[in-house]
Amino acid sequence: MSSQNIKNLTGVSIMNGHFKLQNLLGSGAFGTVYCAVRTSGKGAGKEKFAVKVMPRPEEKSMKKWSLDEELRLQATVGDHKNVVAVKEVSYEVLKGESYACIRMDFCGLGDFLHATREGLFEDEDDVRSAFLQIIEGVQHCHQRGVFHRDLKPENVLCSKEGKNIRVRIADFGLATDQRVCYEAHGVYGTLKYMPPERICNLNAENRAYSPEQQDVWAIAYMLATACNGDYPWRAAFPVDPHFKAFFADPEVLGKRLPLAHVELVKVLQCALHPDPRCRLTLQQLREQVEKIPLFKKEEKRSFFAKLFSVSD
């Protein structure tokens, strides 16, 4: 049963009646996500969570192994303020069907893509804060030996805390604890945010790649887009004319990012280096984001209303 066939579970109680599913937050290939409210104990009627509902996988199946692995890796890193924490997992029979229910932190502002479109990151300091939080969360994961491999705006969730916005890394469905990975059975993930060593096969004799360097690339690509209002290229692939031009001459990146500050462009030239051995480390990227200007001061931030609105 795919997520498209999951029944409408709005109003259904789960986890021994302690939580009730309310409005649908979103859906994807592997399940649907609801906002759930606590109905008993401290916080009843007020405390909210996100609950991912997915068809219960069969025991000893590949889907069950993948789910267990995702939960294991997320539990390894979920104690950090910039990582979504899994609170509870249960298996339920709801409206006659068997489901896995995963209760997690609720992030009321939605994902980074939605929050940006709502104008929450028009100020340079807000963008800087968001990316420093993203980097801090990913650094925590790497220090625990977990590599995300699918970093993108849709997997960065936002919540309001006082006057500040907290961002958290979510969705560890493609995460790994292997420091070296191999593309033995195709490429999985989101093509746009993948580094060239994953999708171009520049070194045909060695299909190995570093998931740590993939995460660095994805963050740098997101930063380039957030500070310019448009993607630098559609995919790091030779047939993409913009990436092909960058591969031949990194200096052209400034022309692709006319709204980004020249100092940021220089940093991105290193963070998006086609050769992972020459790429910035995550710590080096963090140190640069902390101190350099991100926007050209004379530019207006109105383009953020259109961010990511260009067609894929």
Image (tube, rainbow, N blue to C red):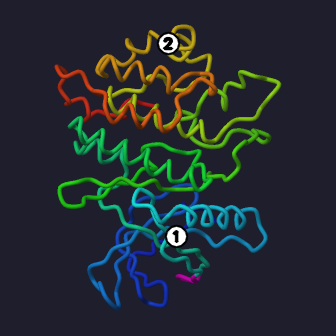
Q: Are marks 1 and 2 in contact (CB under 8 Å)?
A: no
Q: Is residue 141 magenta?
A: no
- Give the quadrant of the N terminus: bottom right
View extreme (right): residue: 205
Chief secondary structure of the magenta span? strand
Residue under circle 1? 53
> Measuring 63% from the left and 22% from the top, which residue is drawn there?
275
Tag shown at residue 128:
none
In the displayed structure, would residue 307 be above or below residue 31? above
Report whether 259 appears left or right of 50. left
* Magenta residues (range): 92-96
Q: Earlier in the sequence, mark 1 or mark 2?
A: 1
Quarter occupied by residue 232: top left
Residue under circle 2? 250
In the displayed structure, would residue 53 be above or below residue 42? above
Report whether 28 appears left or right of 24. right
Report whether 99 appears left or right of 57. left
Report whether 200 appears left or right of 108. right
User: Given this view, does label 1 or label 2 mark the residue nearer the observer?
Assistant: 2
Say which of 8 and 183 sits in front: 183
Residue type highlighted by circle 2: Pro
Q: Is residue 94 magenta?
A: yes
Local secondary structure at mark 1:
strand
> Measuring 72% from the left and 25% from the top, which residue is drawn there?
201
> Where in the figure is residue 98, as x and y percent of width and height?
61, 78
Say which of 209 and 270 sits in front: 270
Local secondary structure at mark 2:
helix
Say which of 39 and 146 sits in front: 146
> Measuring 43% from the left and 48% from the top, which residue is drawn there?
136
Residue type highlighted by circle 1: Val
